[in-house]
Image (cartoon, rainbow, N blue to C red):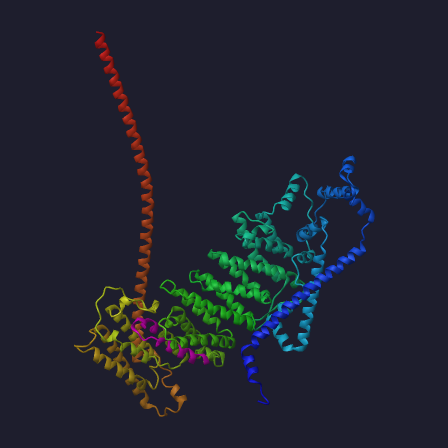
Amino acid sequence: MAGGMKKSTKKFEKKHLKDTLERRKAHAKVKQRYQQKDKRKADNARQRAEIDEANPEDPEQVKKQDAFSQMNVDDFFAGGFDITEGDADQNKKAQKKDVTPKTGKRKRTAEAQAEGDDGSEASSAEEDGAPKSDDDDAASASGSDDFETHKGQLEALKEKDPEFYKYLKENDSELLDFEDHGDLAEVDDLSEAEEEGPAKKKKKGKTAKEDDEVEMVDNTLTIPMVKKWQKLMEEQNSVRAMRQAVLAFRCAAYIDEADSQDQKYSISDPNVYHQVLVTALGTVPKVLAHHLPVKETAGGKVKVSLDSKKFKTLTSLIKSHTSSVHQLLTNLTDAQTLKLTLSSIEPMLPYLLQFRKLLKVLVKTVVAIWADVSTGEATRITAFLLLRRLMVLGDSGIKESVLKATYEGVVKGSRNTTVHTLAGVNLMKNSAAELWGLDQNISYTTGFSFIRQLAMHLRSSITNTSKESYKTIYNWQYTHSLDFWSRVLSQHCDGLAEAQAGKESALRPLIYPVVQITIGAMRLIPTAQYFPLRFQLTRALLRLSRSTGTYIPLASSLLEVLSSAEMRKPPKSSTLKQLDFSTAIRAPKSYLRSRVYQDGVGEQVAELLSEFFVLWSKHIAFPELSVPVVVSLKRWLKQVGSRNGGNKNTKINQMLLLLVQKIEANARWIEERRLTVSYTPRNRAEVETFLKDVDWESTPLGAFVKSQRKLREERAAILEESRREEERRRADEKKADKDQVMKDAGSDDDSSSDEEENEEEDEIEEEEEEEEDEEEDEEEDEDELEMEEE
């Protein structure tokens, strides 16, 4: 105890030290905030005192202003309502301020117009004569003091901890960049240095005057205005025209937002909206490339002059344009416009590398478009090419962000998998696998953390005894994640790819953990209901084994399927349609113990076993590899082929019997070839060269597998065609039903109108009959009167 810490000290350090330090830091921040507030108050009071001393009030003026305070009511009425000189002067000043001064006609040069556009807010404040308050001055002064203090702290950090300062400079340069990156007003200063064309003559007449008034008063954009900016940018690379185009593009991007009324321009015509988008997306990157040329090295890296005045001046324009593009991407639904917008981002990437926060937000939006299976294929490919370009240009931090975003996109985009979305999900996984091989060192460190997360989910599901714990593993997202990693490793750990690179892939150490996690996931719940998921994961491991040459024991997991009660007992007859195992990880309960499901599972087992053995059909140890599986299959065929306790499924039994025969034939073929071998199994170099020049399709098992693949492809093509025909038929029926409903609605309207007409005709006929009856009654009355008179 003499040389160590006390037990109470250790206990305090373990339980309370972290919270205590956090409370002290929070208290220090609050204390610093109050100190700054008191400092600002003291500065304000000091400056007010200095102003009062510099401008003392005139006692005569004070006396005149307080004239009414010393006057009673009688003196006031006796004075004839005189107004004091102080109040009169104030009223005169107010009247002069309210009246707009008359100005003569004057020429509006390009410079004056630019100054009016850029500094409208500042100039209006100065013309109104509104002085700045003391509080604003003090706030700005205190802000500058805080700025200098913070800058001094970081300078001290540079001397005290240069390694950490270097890390900040590489990963967050915006934090250390204290220089003013320029404002939109500085663009005009840069534009004044451009060589303008010959000055146009002043328009005479009423039309010119009206045009000026329209440009000054009405901020509604027109096509001639936008085309004028486009012409200036294309011919002269005008920065001033680019600024106007960026402002108009911002208005177009935020046209549906609530704060769109605060924009400089307004758009009311869809043609103008289209012209603004085309001009901004197509021309702004070209003008930036002219003023800020990008130099690309042989390794694919780019260099931009960040210290130039032009870059600091155009920074605000670059950020504004990029934020408008991001806003546009989140709201667009048209495929062509979305593709055009994505294509316009690629030439902007060299400038956006300096703004990491903005770039990360943009990457997430692009990944969301790429991962959306409902988006068109051309648009998704455009988004993928943009991400790939960013992987080439960016540094390690940006590459890691892109890789993380793409993996999250794969997980989110594969949540719902159907026959309609399966092609889109596969496109997403294949394109993402290509991105993960561009920088394999970063991919290894990033991928290891994601694979570790999958292992932790599997471990927690195994150790957790709740009934719902398996659902974190047995879902489409987890299945597609494992399949994605098998695609990544298969693509970049392939022997041909490694030979081209001249070295072993940095991702190869990830093969073992991926295989272990996949085998553990497929055996988590060995029930017949989840046989489809087992087949999905088995295909992923077969792909990995085929590409990397790694032996993975998959036969045992397939033999477990045959040993289940689902395959050993006779099935029940049913009228269910065949289950699509490519888009299913869980079989409905209605399929269990049915003939349709048993046939489907048997076909999958036979196919996967043949695909597993064909990988090693040329290997010198194939006979020894096949013996245990052949023995197990023969034993199973003997059990299910018995008359009393068999499964009574001749189709599946014959299929597996044929597979056993082909495996045995291939084993005999290998034994014949290795009779002439003189080296021992210890000589691995010679073992690897055994039958290296022989094609796998020429082996007995290879020829059988090739024919089976062709039959399956033909069957799949027929099923796909029938599915599409069924979809077209349903669409036609739906359209016909809709037309019929519309026709019925129209006929109902016609029938109702006919009924109304019939009712009106009936009423008219009734009225005519009543009139005829009245006339007959009148005639009878007249006849009676005549009879009486006679």
What is the number of callouts on the image?
0
Image location (x, y in percent) of residue 416: 39, 64
Residue at position x 40%, y 81% in the image? 550
In the figure, is residue 145 to the left or right of 460?
right
Vertical placement of 418 versus 207: above or below? Answer: below
Is residue 565 or residue 374 the one in the foreground? 565
In the rendered structure, the answer to whether residue 328 lies left or right of residue 529 reads right
Determine the image quadrant of residue 608. bottom left
Main SS type for the magenta part? helix
The residue stretch that appears in magenta? 509-536
Looking at the image, can residue 168 be seen? yes
Magenta stretch: residue 163 in it?
A: no
25 on left or right of 601: right
Rendered image quadrant of residue 603:
bottom left
Q: Quadrant of the C terminus?
A: top left
616 or 601: nearer the eye? 601
Outermost residue to the top: 790
Occupied quadrant, residue 597: bottom left
Above or below: residue 397 compared with residue 366: below
Determine the residue positioned at 52% across, 49% down: 270
Left or right of 262 in this view: 540: left
Q: Is residue 305 something one can see in this rendering?
A: no
User: Residue 207, relative to residue 177: is it above or below?
Assistant: above
- Where is residue 264 shown, x and y percent of the image? 61, 51
In-front residue for pair 508/561 = 561
Q: Quadrant of the N terminus?
A: bottom right
Q: Residue 618, image x and y in percent?
A: 34, 83
Q: Residue 525 colored magenta?
A: yes
Residue 5 location, x and y as percent?
Answer: 58, 85
